[in-house]
Amino acid sequence: MKPFITAEPSKTKSALILIFWLLIWQIVYLAVAKDVIIPSPANTFSALGQLLLTQAFYRDVAATMSRVLAGIVISFGAGLLTAIGAYLIFLVRDIMGFMINILKSTPVMAVIIFALLWLPSGNVPIFVCFLMCYPIVYTNVLAGLDSLSRDYIEMSRIYRIRRRDLIESIYLPFVAPHIKSALSLTTGLSWKTVVAAEVLSSPAFSMGYNLLNAKVYLDTESLFAWIIAIVALSMAFEKIVNLLLGIRRGGPAK
Amino acid sequence: MIEVSHIYKRFNKDYLFEDFSLIFKENQVTSLIGPSGCGKTTLLRMMAGLESYESGSISGIDQSKVSFVFQEDRLLPWLSVYQNIALVLKAKCTPAEVGEKVSAVLALLDLSAASDMMPFELSGGMQRRVAIGRALAYDGSVIFLDEPFKGMDDKLKGEVLEELATAWNKTGKTVILVTHDLVDARRLSDTIYELGGRPLAQIGVLD
């Protein structure tokens, strides 16, 4: 039987995989032979190098990243509070369950367009990120709380365990893996939603706005350079978060 | 004296307890024996305040001062043996007292060497002893034991019975033990109530 957990590829293997895809890119570039449709890898990396030398790049990256972080923090704050409410009160669970189902089925674009109507452009990405990440946090935290065996709660009642100890020694160990899992899932999603919302809401300082500009001026090399920067930052962000959480690639949350 | 008086409790539509009464003497070990499913555990849970009943009364127990050894060990798998026992003491003891009490109980149950071990590292019998140790350390005025010897082989059961008999003699607690084994009950108890029938009734007493 094949192992369920895939091993992380070695650095050499990763480098070879990267070279393989760069070669495919180069072949497609040569086949299409139109810079405006697909730029060459060399020109794209040259454009990325120039971007990295500008101060504006770092300002825009910082602005996007702060929106990502704000979206995640708000999602976790709201998700934790409402999941605890839903765990304790059945009415809250029913009310929230209905809303979560709607949010899960709502297309991102619909949320962005709706948010554009009544929020400043800089806040639209944060709001959209929150609406997309919040259901994941809520669902995971509630699942963690629900997985807590009634046996332990009864035991804590009998022995009059202090509320602080109950949270620290019983609730948190049950919920922590689910919070980690939610954080791991939302890191990638948060970048995608924030950048998508930035493209449509066009806040002055943002990576998404630069994507839109590059598209409007048919500057495909810059467009690709920004995409690479976004993907690299998103992956690095996810990696750092997983590293902090002690989650290995392909492995379960511990 | 603990008095269970005229208890009525339904299980689904039928009465499991109908005008059920029983008296437990203080500072004695009382065993409840009877067939599986007759309601022994439910009676224990009602006395401990874990289960409600339709009418009747249970007096003579301060439910804030009871210890309970459940049928399952209910040890927290991420806490060591020491931490599992210490957890139930933190609310009423200083850290120094917690240390003293846990060490004393571990020594009594011959678990000192396992103090830092995690529950999954222990045999079933050792886990059972930790659960019993937790109940002893908590020092409730009434100790409920629900099938405490379940899953133990005869040798281990003999050892634990010995340890418990010593512990009861030292502490003089009120102990209510549920078991289906008359031999175990005889070794530990001052009084044995035989329960059975539906609705549940006392059908015998052995002093």
Image (tube, coloured by chain):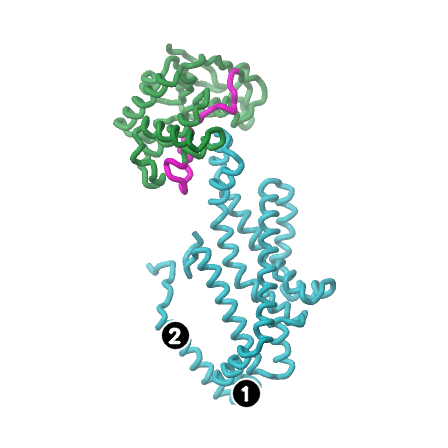
Chain colours: A cyan, B green
Foreground mark, 2 or 1, reads 2
Question: Residue at left 35%, top 21%?
Answer: B167
Which residue occupies the foreground of this view, B106 or B200? B106
Q: Is residue B63 above or below residue B190?
A: below
The quadrant where residue A10 appears: bottom left
Asked which secondary structure carries label 1, the reply is loop
Q: Is residue B175 above or below residue A128?
A: above
Neighbour class for label 2 at 10 Å: few (<14), some, many (≥20)? few
Q: Is residue A50 above or below residue A234?
A: below
Asked which secondary structure carries label 2, the reply is helix
| Residue highlighted by disc 1 | A35
- Whether labels 2 and 1 belong to a single chain: the reply is yes
Which residue occupies the foreground of this view, B50 or A213? A213
Q: Chain of mark 1?
A: A
| Residue highlighted by disc 2 | A15
* Residue A74, x across and y down, in percent: 61, 55
| Numbered range of the magenta stretch | B60-83
